[in-house]
Amino acid sequence: MKLLDSSLFSTLDITEEKQKLLKDYLFHENVQRCKLFAKLVILFEMILIALNVLATYSSNTSFINPYLIFYITLVVFSFLLLFYIFLFEKKERLTEKEGKWFQAGVLGFVSFFLLWGTVVTLWDQKEYGHVMVFAINFMCVSVLFHASNRTILTLYSLPTIVLVIGLPFFQSSTEVLFGHYVNLLVFLFFCWLASRMLYRSHVSAFYSKMLLMEKNKELAKKIEENEKINNQLQQANVSLHQLTLIDELTKIPNRRGFQSYINNALHDDKRSRTLAILMLDIDYFKLFNDHYGHIEGDHVIQMVAQNIHACIDPAVSFSARFGGEEFVVAIFDQEKRDVVELGGKIRNSVLKSRIAHNFSLCHDVVTVSIGAAIACVQSVEDVEQLMIAADETLYKAKQNGRNRFEVS
């Protein structure tokens, strides 16, 4: 038996998967309302049982009467419903067959509740002549039990047929009987109308909630994708920026990388700092290129860069290719003797590499000349002046025969 109205889904364009989700949602909500309603019925019927017993006791009539049986019967079935629901709800997961049995049981109780109200109403014709119980039961089901149009009409059918056929046997007045039929027709129509409105409202609310969740998921996914793209772009920008700071041939920082290092060092520490600048030049490199070729010249530049990098301490020093065969080393917060020791270490490291340079005018292997200058700096302008001083010292080292280290 379908609990969903397929015509409604055609307007909302819900997939089969969503229809199943809606079906499960509505059934779960119906079960929770049935549980609450069964508890209220038990409470109300127990009060009626107590009043019935008191009435029979005070009037000295028979303790057992039809209404007492009606009340007890509904109490028993309400307890059975609660137990039935408990048996299924304690299971973590229901099989498809168990789910069908669960739904069938709940629908069976709703049918019994309506039929019970019909029987009580027929019996009331002998005592009171009203159809109040039938009307109340139908109103409760229409408002509390949300199901498809087919399911609601199926639930309505048997109790209504029993009442329509049974009324003439229990109500002797033709006028009262006719009034019952007219009133019940109008009442049933409005009960059905109320059930449809509530059902469509719940379906629409569920679909809107699901649509909102889907949009939120899509939005979250797009945000995640955008963040991922932004992170990739940021990483790419960082990589590109790093590439602009690295010399392609030697893989050590270039002139721009050196300037960036100096700027950051001065920016991070506003106080005046001791800085040593070492300017280094490969001796007679043009002659080496002219006779050995540019490829071998590139190898020499790479070798010198590796030697410099191996000699310095990255914690306090920074080396870069300043251009062509010229290199620069910056050393912060070190004593002069440490600078002198480093300069000699770099010169000896290159010399010990023993790369033949038969066209050098100072040695038969590749050598370097180094000029150093030390001063306290606080700004980029101070560093520029210090570099000029280091360059002048380098020129002095070359004048004094090359393959030398000079410090001013």
Image (tube, rainbow, N blue to C red):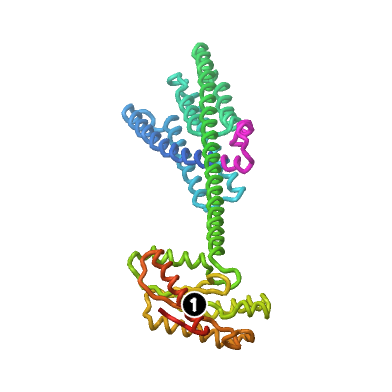
Q: Which amino acid, mark 1?
A: Tyr
Above or below: residue 321 compared with residue 344 = above
Residue 259: give x, y in percent of width and height: 47, 65
Residue situated in front as seen by the camera: 21 or 134: 21
Where on the picture, by quarter, is residue 200?
Answer: top right
Residue 371: give x, y in percent of width and height: 46, 78
Residue positioned 38% across, 78% down in the render: 334
Label 1: how many Cα within 10 Å (few below 14, some 14–19, many 20+)? some
Quarter placement of the C terminus: bottom left
Residue 70: give x, y in percent of width and height: 45, 32
Say whether residue 7 is magenta: yes
Quarter placement of the N terminus: top right
Where on the picture, by quarter, is residue 324?
Answer: bottom right
Q: In the figure, is residue 11 to the left or right of 320?
A: right
Where is mark 1, residue-wise? 395
Above or below: residue 74 compared with residue 101 = above
Residue situated in front as seen by the camera: 225 or 14: 225
Residue 67: give x, y in percent of width and height: 43, 30
Residue positioned 55% across, 70% down in the render: 323
Residue situated in front as seen by the camera: 42 or 18: 18
Residue 115 seen by the camera: no
Where on the picture, by quarter, is residue 341?
Answer: bottom left
Q: Which residues are magenta?
A: 1-22
